[in-house]
Image: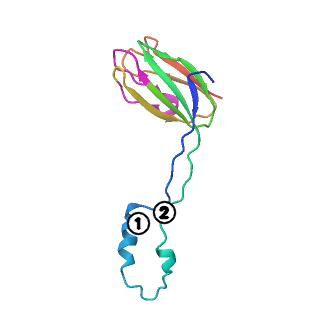
Amino acid sequence: MTCAQRMVSRRGLLVAGFTAGGAVAASVMSGLPTAGREIDDAASNAPASPVATPVADVIEIAIEAVGLRFSPSSFSIPARTPVRIVFTNRSRVYHDFTIPGLGRQTRRIGPDETSELMIQAEPGAYDFYCSIQSHHQAGMGGTITAE
């Protein structure tokens, strides 16, 4: 991995079985008669404890547009691993970051703006470029290798 790559440990929570609508419904239902049902008062008064699932570690790659070039113009990533690409435009004109082989593209960003996208690639080589007219033809492209 290059020095532009760094491992970022991101932990997120995926809350299962508890939604705002479910909380409202449970609150409303608690005051209704319960004909034919038994209620465990201790369980119904217990605070909700959502199930949490950590999100896997994500590799982060920083890419910059400098003039009509990307820096770095090629890099390697582990195959089948989530990768966050943080694309920053250090140029005076608009750019985007497009990976046609993965069907991914950032929005067009102006000078000193940043855009991110997530990818996960099978082993292979994937070209990337700026899709703004004439930028790719002027040399604004590169290669991602998933190993």
Q: How far is mark 2 from mark 1, CA to CA?
A: 8 Å
Q: How crowded is mark 1: few (under 14 residues within 10 Å), some or many (20 or more)?
A: few
Residue 58, by quadrant, is top right
Q: Mark 1 points at which residue?
A: 22
The colour scheme is: rainbow
In this view, which residue lies farthest toward the bottom?
36
Question: Badge 2 local density, few (<14 within 10 Å), some, or many (20+)?
Answer: few
Q: How many marks?
A: 2
Q: Position of residue 108 (x, y in %)?
A: 36, 26
For image coordinates 42% across by 61% down, the residue present is 19
| Badge 2 or badge 1: first in the primary sequence | 2
Instruction: Name the residue type under label 1.
Output: Gly
**Is 130 situated left or right of 11 in this image?**
left
Residues tagged 2 and 1 counted as in contact (Cβ below 8 A): yes
Residue 101 shown in magenta: yes
Q: Mark 2 points at which residue?
A: 17
Q: Which mark is residue 89?
A: none
Q: What stretch is highlighted in magenta?
A: 88-109
Tell me the residue at 40%/27% (across/down).
114
